Amino acid sequence: MSSDRPAAAQADLFSGFDSRPPAGDGPCAAALAALLADPAAAGWRELPFFADGTAGRVVAAVDARIAAGAQVLPPPAAIFNALRLTPLESVKVVILGQDPYPTPGDAHGLAFSYQGKRRLPPSLKTILDEAAEDLGLPRPLSGDLTPWARQGVLLLNTALTVEAGKAGAHLKLGWSALADEAVAAVSAQRPAAVFMLWGGPARRRAALIDRTKHLVLEAGHPSPLNRRNDFRGTKPFSQANAWLASRGLAPVDWRLARSVG
């Protein structure tokens, strides 16, 4: 993202950060610059991932794939939506996903959240069925989890980008450091939060969490490919709300839209 701001003023704006240009002038570099300039991201941009130049290198790699003709998802402007919609100082629940849906139009920067027009993805359907049964809610028809994010539910994938038709394509680009640092930051800086760790990759991050301050709810992955079937019936949503209420915090309203569009 270009700017008419003088260089000295830009240095003041990003004081404490690596002042080198983060990643050139590609669309993902522009999205990174917008995030760093967003007041809502003030807490997140203190993470080493952003401060030491790692973010710049990762988005440069993603922009290189775009330049080579790859269709990267979600659209660059949505890559950092999880951090923009859920500031660090408002986090009270953390849900980790793996990487975005690899079908154009489906992902919009929030783990598990879905904006497509087809049937809900199987893992998301399992999550929403569990929420409905756990809390006695009607099953939503929309898979857009933005209302959760706006209430302090950090919906963060361990890779923020993917390529169309190539699930897992960007898992090794360096995004995972952001997930590790975000989990550690919530653990260190928030007084009380619920961490919902579903599946092996998410559960391995339990070691980053201070269990004397926070509630850690571990379960199997909601994917129908999970042969252990150890997600359904775990009641994470009611457990989270009861625990938050016991600490004087507002529970999450897990209801979603009943219709699409």
Image: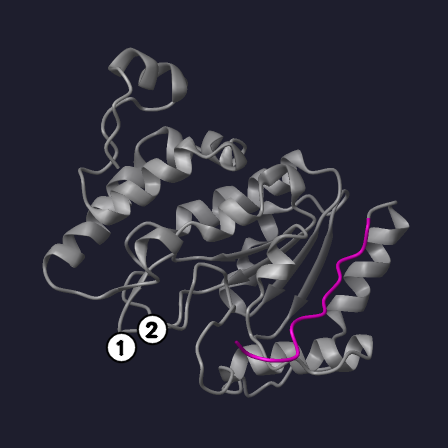
* Residue 58 as seen in the image, left or right of residue 229: left
* Quadrant of residue 49 within the rendered picture: top left
Taking the magenta stretch, the answer to whether it contains residue 254 is: yes
Residue 101: where, in percent of width, then height?
A: 39, 72
Taking the magenta stretch, the answer to whether it contains residue 223 is: no
Circle on res. 165: 1
Count of marks overlaid on the render = 2
Structural crowding at the residue carrying mark 2, measured as other residues with C-alpha within 10 Å and reported as few (<14), some (14–19) or many (≥20): many
Residue at image location 81% in from the left, 60% down from the top: 241
The alpha-carbon separation of the residues under discs 1 and 2 comes to 5 Å
Span shown in magenta: 250-261
Q: Quadrant of the N terminus?
A: top left
Q: Is residue 120 above or below residue 171?
A: below
| Element class at badge 1 | loop
Residue 58: where, in percent of width, then height?
A: 27, 46
* Residue 24 as seen in the image, left or right of residue 18: left
| Element class at badge 2 | loop
Residue 44: where, in percent of width, then height?
A: 50, 37
Structural crowding at the residue carrying mark 1, measured as other residues with C-alpha within 10 Å and reported as few (<14), some (14–19) or many (≥20): some
Regarding residue 222, the answer to whether it shows in the image is no
Q: Which residue is mark 2?
A: 102
* Quadrant of residue 102 within the rendered picture: bottom left
Please state which of residues 141 and 15 is positioned toward the viewer in this rendering. Answer: 141
Residue at image location 54% in from the left, 60% down from the top: 96
Residue at the limit of the structure toward the top, as seen here:
8
Q: Is residue 117 above or below residue 102?
A: below
Q: From the image, give the main secondary structure of the stretch colored magenta.
A: loop
Residue at image location 9% in from the left, 59% down from the top: 68
* Residue 114 as seen in the image, left or right of residue 104: right
The type of residue carrying mark 2 is Pro
Do labels 1 and 2 touch, CB within 8 Å? yes
